[in-house]
Image (tube, helix red, strand yellow):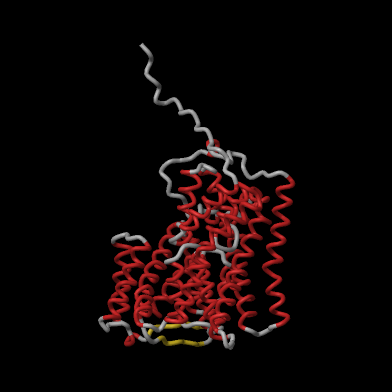
Amino acid sequence: MMDAPDDKTPAAPMAPPAYPTLSDATRVWARIAALSFGGPAGQIAVMHRILVEEKRWLGDGRFLHALNFCMLLPGPEAQQLATYIGWLMHGVRGALVAGILFILPGVAAIMALSWIYAIWGEVGLVSGMFFGLKAAVLAIVAQAVIRVGRRALESAGLRVIAAASFVAIFAFGVPFPVIVLAAAVVGWVGAAAGLAIFRAAGGHGTAGARHVHDAETLLGEEAGERDLAGRAAARRAGLVALALWLLPVGVLLLIAPGSVFTDIAVFFSQLAVLTFGGAYAVLAWVAQEAVGTYGWLAPGEMLDGLAMAETTPGPLIMVLQFVGFVGAFREAGWTAPLLAGTLGGLLATWVTFAPCFAWIFLGAPWMERLRANAILSGALTAVTAAVVGVILNLALWFAVHVVWREVLRIEAGPLSLELPVLGSIDWAAAALTVLAMLAVFRFGLGTATVLGGAAAAGVALHLTGLA
């Protein structure tokens, strides 16, 4: 009689799939782009499911390796992760295909919605829809605070950094770049001193029940060590991306200093090098500057733009295109404001994402060295903790401007903060916000469901005259 197989004998490794052509990969990246809703956590989960579990282009180890590298960089990590994996698969051309396809649906969708908003934004049904979406956005941002906090604040020391970050931006108006720099210095010094609290945590994580081993995938266990020619091509592409980013900024500074287009180019270029911590953290700075300093749009319009980005595919940071559109639409002084808005929105997108390609092309060949640098990882850990406080400030800022009609600005020495006028509460907005919070936290409904329900509720309130 034949012996029964031993259950403890490891199964033979699966053979890797056939290597895709660039055309085949393009179709896969287009599919990922069409499904990239829900912010970076959802987008990274989609990439993991398709690239790791379905296609087996790379394994869990290589995927997390790449994600940790992208977490070290400024900019939207999901878009950079796509760009980086595209580079691993097909070099510079693969990176361009993956990175550009990842943002194209969002560019088109946000631009179309920006035109609709500019032309019909005051029309009752459109206004009612955005009234409801604001409540849902507030609930989603609150959820982001909790998610990021659970991942990042693993010790009392990191919680202190988060609390100090919140107080600095909420009560004293400290600019976001200063907070990031201070946190990075604290983390750098702490890691150099060997403090355990500054050991890097693990990014967004990947929710896959089945572990895919690197050896069973196309890229294998030793992927990423390209030949000298491939690394040289990446460096050349990185320098070209830097030139394509900085050249329009330099030209605008020379020929149109002080114009809204120059302000857009310079401001969003600053964001491009300081956007650690994801889109929600950056939006706190955008709200602080675009609303308070430049006056490009009102707080409620900032929320409308975030609602657009939440309901369309592509990186959540695409809300910056809407900010650039509205700023140029209002400030350019052209006889063709829609053309000015279109150029302003595209300019904001250009200077936001061109640097992302530069960081990947210039940094990818040195990925192993960057990941192994414990001091650099410690600085990022402190920055991530500070970002929790910044996102909490963003949630409160949204709450004040969604639920109350009037805000009191307090300026007393270094103190600078906004508090709601309690008697100006908007009861319809407050009720919608409570319902959205229940939908997210009590019933665990998805982003699309919450946003759709809130938009429908906003339209219904408008039709009944309650909003």
Q: Nearer the viewer, residue 350 or 372?
A: 350
Q: Residue 350 at what x, y percent from top left?
A: 61, 69
User: In the rendered view, would you say 428 is above or below 110?
Assistant: below
Nearer to us in this view, 181 or 83: 83
Q: In this rendering, does residue 308 appear at all?
A: yes
Report the residue that reaches farthest toward the top.
1
User: 6 or 256, which lies in front?
Assistant: 256
Q: Quadrant of residue 341?
A: bottom right
Q: Locate the C terminus by quadrant.
A: bottom left
Q: Is residue 466 left or right of residue 91?
A: left
Q: Which residue corresponds to the image point at 50% horizontal and 31% vertical from the top-left? A: 13
Whole-percent x, y for residue 45 in the image: 45, 52
- Looking at this view, name the residue that lies furthest to the left: 464
Residue 190 in view (yes/no): no
Q: Position of residue 375 (x, y in %)?
A: 62, 55
Task: Indicate the quadrant containing the N terminus: top left, top right, bottom left or bottom right.
Answer: top left
Residue 78 in percent (x, y) is at 53, 58
Q: How many marks?
A: 0
Residue 448 against residue 297 in the figure, above or below: above
Residue at (57%, 88%) from the top-left corner?
335
